[in-house]
Image: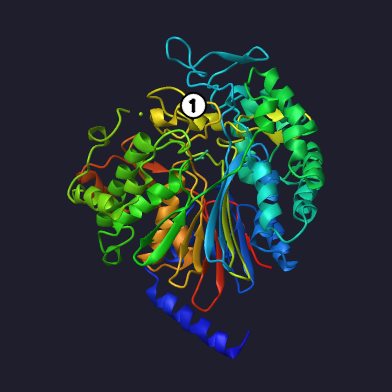
Amino acid sequence: MSWFRFLIQLCGLLLVTTCTTTTDSQSLLSRSFGPAQQGRRASDYHAESDRGMVVAAHPLASAAGAAMLSRGGNAIDAAVATSFVISVVRPQSTGLGGGGFMLYHDQARKRQRIFDFRERAPMKANATMFINDRGDYKNVFFNGQQVKDPAIVGHLSVAVPGLVKGLVEIHRELGKLKLNEVIAPAIDAASKGFPVYPSLAKEIKEREQWLQLYPGSRQIFFKDGKPLEAGQKLVQSDLAETLKLIAATGYRDFYEGETSKKIVSEIKKGGGVLDTTDLRSYRMIERVPVSSYYRGHRVVSMPPPSSGGVHIIEMLNMLEQKDLSKLHPRGATYLHYLAEVMRRAFADRAKEMGDPDFVDIPTHRLTSKAYAKNLAASIDPQKVTPSSTMGLSAPTGESPSTSHISVMDQWGNAVATTQTVNYSFGSCVVAVGTGVVLNDEMDDFTTKPGGSNAFGLVTGPKNDIAPGKTPLSSMSPTMILDKKGQVELVAGSPGGPRIINAVLQTITNVIDFKMSLLDAVHATRIHHQWMPDTLRYENNALDDDTKKRLTAIGHALTPIETVGDVQAISRDSSGMIHGVSDIRSDGKPATP
Ligand code: GLY
């Protein structure tokens, strides 16, 4: 490193240190966010480099991406390699049987592209497929056992997976390395296996009843009839073979060959509706990103059928009405305002959002400054606006499903991609002979009018099921660009609706409260999603005085374990790239 660069970095470090607020990493070390944190220090979640960065929710996945950068691959090679490995090592979160979104920044062309490879409803799906004549969920049985919520568990909940086609097509157009090179680390991880980590063991245990019911899943996630425990090895030989077929044939075998036949045969065993023609006709869709400016920084994010980008921009536009830098990031004044902003955006989510190829979405209005100004003016600083007075008539848990990957390469190209099988282990069905965990993405539609999904989210008729339609999502791969058009922040998260608020708070922590990326990601978060009408807060997010003040103005407060699992990258003015994995989970950044 040259002396000149060293001096610039030193000045940058001093500046960041002086600007950093009281949300210091030391106080975060004492916070407990669950098993992932055991034995790790806050600094273990941070890396820096001027040659590129990969941040993902498992060290094997980020290492695979960084290895592609070391070989001269670009951000797409790294993102695709990381995605295939995360599909192997986080079967509770995402996988070949799921789908996702990818935001790509092409530095040479100063252009962003959005790829939608989310699951779509099968052609035999319809708006009432989950309910009986009385409007209740239908009784569905498998091997004599009742599947209580057929939109979350079992064969009927499976939508047409898009992940394999998306990753292969994107790589074919934009990658530099060969497909078999970028898939090799995933084949390795599946065939040699890896130790089950505590949060994976916890999830297998939590979904034990259903994973045990379906033979394909029982074969993989159980040993001697018992759920795999932390420290035991998870080997996925069938998945390794499926990955080898992808390396050899691209997406052909998965959508038209042996793998597709095995998937359809599995679906038929449990009364599902996904068919060979659904797989054969699956299409990835390139969409136009949503973008806006927040305090002079350009924000680029995911458009519908995700609600994420629209509502991040809508909320930032409301937040822009106040000078947040004068407020404390954990004080009652800011948190009340933030919660009211969230409430308003999520009320719009329920009313307005769905698949833009099927229904009209007022994206322009929702992301306009004028609309946000009016909404912000309706916030009373002294009392809450009850959710029942806004929007639809209505009804949380956060699932550890979904996973986000952030990448930046030495040329300044960047990728933000969020991928999912929806709820933990998706439908809990593995197609026998493939190792593929099938998604339960049908639950992201309005499966029962007036009801809520696995995340407690209410959506309206715009999100009703229709053949070929894409279910509404919250996934929010997002980038912030500086005035020169270079990426200064890449971020995303899992967590259903909490995704949107986790990404939002990361952005405001960096831009308004001038936190370092490490502090911005690790700082405690809150979550409000309009319905249920409660302000959720993470362990230690609120001190007693703040709780008292928030309660006094009408907030119902509910403690929760975590809001999101952000994987983020920032690039400072000296060109140094910082990668941060969230202290809440199992991730680790890797550098080439
Ligand atoms: N399945 C969660 C989401 O797409 O938001």
Quadrant of residue 215 in the image? top right
Choose between 484 and 233: the one closer to the eye.
Answer: 484
The three-letter amino acid code for the residue at tag 1 is Ile
Residue 167 visible in the snapshot:
yes
- At x 51% / y 84%, what residue is drawn? 8
Secondary structure type for disc 1: loop
Q: Quadrant of residue 497?
A: top left
Give the image location of residue 561, x and y in percent. 46, 44
Point out the image quarter for the N terminus.
bottom right
Whether residue 487 sits left or right of residue 169 in the image: it is: left
Residue pointed to by mark 1: 465
Tell me: 182 left or right of 513. Answer: right
353 left or right of 425 in image: left
The C terminus lies in quadrant: bottom right
**Could you tell me residue 557's position as x and y percent?**
31, 42
Locate residue 443, reporting x and y percent: 51, 29
Picture mark count: 1
Q: Answer whether residue 563 is visible to the viewer in this image.
A: no
Q: Is residue 556 above or below residue 177?
A: above
Give the x, y percent position of residue 56. 61, 55
When the figure is inspected, residue 565 is found, relative to residue 110, above or below; the finding is above
